[in-house]
Amino acid sequence: MAHPRLLLRTALALLPALASGFPRTEHTLRERAAAVGPVTSGLPAGWKYGACYVDNAHGRIFALELPDNSGLTIQSCITSCAAQGFTVAGAEFGVQCFCGKELINGAVTAPVSDCNMACGGSATEACGGPNRLSVYSNGPITVLPIPTVQTTGLPGQWQYAGCLEEPAPNRVFPYQIINTNNNSATACLAQCSKFG
């Protein structure tokens, strides 16, 4: 076995050669980040760049996430969302595409420079970053507020009693009403009142 000092000297001698094989210096990382940016031309008709948004400031800002795609581009994300009838698309972490008709959970913007991760399928297109989304839309972007508990304006004698956790596998309430287009506390309570 080689002497420990000889191994250390050999390792130190090899460091400059190893470092030159890895061009990730502060300078090259800055140049690469400067080369990545939002897509402002060549988008499908009607679509435009909105802004860089923070994801998870108050929860996820899109309700639908598509499967990760290592070949993701802004155009492919928009095309996938538009094909499903969505008007807002967002790319995050280089390979993630999200779709919606609005942003949820009180979405807030971030500096454009925060969305600096290249898309998996294009080294010059910004596809968000860690907890950052490059957001595009076909029309104005609506941002819904952070959900809050409704304690006033409830119908009849109804009062807010708290949040209950359902014990698996049983349900707290024996009946369920599915309101796909108008689910609110007021609508739910009004319907329950009709059933007695």
Image: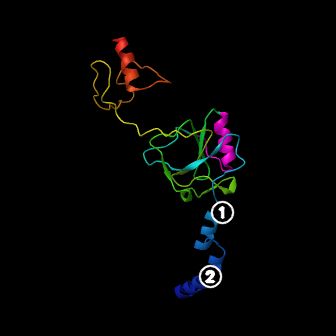
- Residue 14: x percent and y percent? 62, 82
Dividing the picture into quadrants, the one containing residue 89 is top right
**For numbered disc 1, what is the local secondary structure?**
helix
Residues at marks 1 and 2 touching, judged by CB atoms closer than 8 Å: no
Q: Amino acid at mark 1?
A: Ala
User: Which residue in the structure is indicated by mark 2?
Assistant: 16
Q: Is residue 156 visible?
A: yes
138 or 129: nearer the viewer? 138
- Mark 1 neighbour density, 10 Å: few (under 14) some (14–19) many (20 or more): some
Residue at 61% across, 85% down: 13
On the rendered structure, is 172 left or right of 24?
Answer: left
* CA distance separating discs 1 and 2: 27 Å
Is residue 170 among what the camera can see? no
The residue lying furthest to the right in this view is 42
Segment tinted magenta in the rendering: 65-83
Q: In the picture shown, does residue 158 fall above or below 168?
A: above
Q: Amino acid at mark 2?
A: Pro
Looking at the image, residue 56 sits to the left or right of residue 8; the answer is left
Where is residue 103? Give x, y as percent. Answer: 51, 40
Image quadrant holding the N terminus, namely bottom right
Residue 33 sits above or below residue 168 on the image:
below
In the picture of the structure, the residue carrying the numbered disc 1 is 35
Q: Position of residue 120 (x, y in %)?
A: 66, 53
Instruction: Tell me where residue 109 appears, x and y as whole percent.
Output: 50, 50
Residue 43 is drawn in which quadrant? top right
Which residue is at the front of the view, 7 or 154? 154
- At a point 70% along the width and 42% down the height, the residue shown is 44
Numbered disc 2: secondary structure: helix
Number of numbered tags placed on the structure image: 2
